[in-house]
Image (cartoon, grey):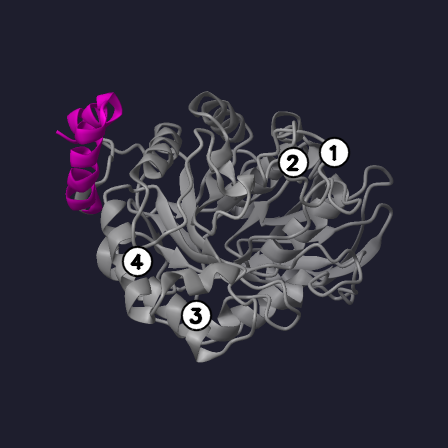
Amino acid sequence: MVDLFCRAREAASGHRAQKFLQVFVMLIIAAIGCSKAEAVTQRLTVTANGRHLMKEDGKPFFWMGDTNWRLYKLTEEQVTTYLQNRKAKKFNVIQGPVLVQNGWNSETTNAYGEVNDDPSNPNQAWFQHIDFIVNKADELGLYVALTVSWGDNWDIFGTPTQARNVGIWLGERYKNNTNVIWNVAGEYIIAGTGPNITNVWNELGEGLEQGSEGQNLITIHGSYQAGRQSSSVVFHDADWLDFNMIQSSQGGNSGSGADNWNLVTTDYDKSPVKPTMDTEATYEDLGGWDAFGVRRRAYWSVFAGAAGHTYGGNGVWQSYRGDGDDTAWWPSDTWDVAMDYEAAFDMKYLRRLMESRPMRKRIAGMDVLLTPGGSVPNRLQATRDSQGRYAMIYVPQTNRTFAVDTSKIAGTTVKAWWFNPTNGQATLVGQFPASGPREFTTPNSGEDWVLVLDNKAKKYPAPGKGGPLP
């Protein structure tokens, strides 16, 4: 029935037919949406320890996101090309597109000339394209973190009660889409944290939870403002907030958020325990950021205890098409070129590494290091299994000697590996007694390395192979 209705809407022509269908859409799609009859993806939830995400069947889920706030600018054919590219690179979450925003320039117009700038009167032609994006992503096993609005558009929702109603409508509309994750707002703090702003986002979040009947995870994107770069600053205790989002931002090696492991640690130590992750770090090809810089932020945050990470490429996040498009942050390449930047390939190796070892009991693990972690840009960051089954240390330096406490690994023997974040290759270092301090030196080649220490008795495969493990 839903499929027939969607096709009927697409085929409708003439003013009277369109008017009738618009009213019909408002009444029916609000409740059922244009969902596929059978989803490929499973719903996501939070693990019992509050640290990570998992699927309905209990398998752990490592968030490997890609940023595309303006995905609506691409045609259906282009969307398909983009999503297939991301699936091939092992991304599993598309962060975007933004749904509601003031139509002040062409960048809020979709590929078919539609805008959606009035929350009280949703443009159904706009949502038809969003439906396509969501359903095509599901066909490919990808999740979509739909962002309701930019933070500076808080006032277009009217009163907090009206914002709640918008949330209810959206939540109901996509509650049958197992691959939808809700992001209440992008960069939620713009003019401050006064109640007239935060009340809008709280009510919108509660409306999404009510409308979706709690079936879709909900979060809100952190601010770019120093000291407020995580959703936890204002919304951590909100019942609707399932996990925190951090924006370590594009401030370079000296700007606020450059030490993004500290942002993760702050969230990690909060109560109640909720997952957190850096979902807007440095964009590749923005401000001189290369693949190495992008990898550092990714590994620092994940190893500090984050449940995943979101990558961004400068031409991709804005679906830059050239030919007069807004050139925010001066992209060098159009989206179809930028989606093959170097670090976009590297992210799959991070995901494979984490999935090749048990994930649900992975914790921050700086206590395995006997050498000080240091700071930007040569920060050593460690993560480990709470049961001592393995530990990992990220080292963004070649020929770097450091000491670890091998007694943190359970069992009698430690099996050590070097893992290369640029190609996913693992090299066996050797086997050692799990009995105390031991020094290791990174290979004298490449740019960054991960030392993986396993309890030999577990007989894990080479790092980056197999999984996901529970």
Q: CA distance from mark 4 to mark 3?
A: 25 Å
Instruction: Assess whether mark 3 and mark 4 are in contact (beta carbons under 8 angstroms).
Output: no
> Percent x, y for residue 123?
32, 42
Type of amino acid at the residue the image marks with label 3: Val
Query: What label does residue 249 carry, if any?
Result: none
Image side of residue 142 versus residue 123, left or right: right
Mark 4 sits on what residue?
167
Mark 2 sits on what residue?
315
Instruction: Assess whether mark 2 and mark 1 are in contact (beta carbons under 8 angstroms).
Output: yes
Mark 1 sits on what residue?
332
Label whose residue precedes the other's in the sequence (1 or 4): 4
**Residue 92: in sight, yes or no?**
yes
Q: CA distance from mark 1 to mark 2?
A: 7 Å
In this view, 414 is above or below 273: above
Assign a secondary structure to mark 4.
helix
Say which of 272 and 313 sits in front.
Answer: 313
Per the rendered image, the range of residues in magenta is: 1-30
Q: Residue at x 84, y 54 (%)?
A: 401
Mark 3 sits on what residue?
273
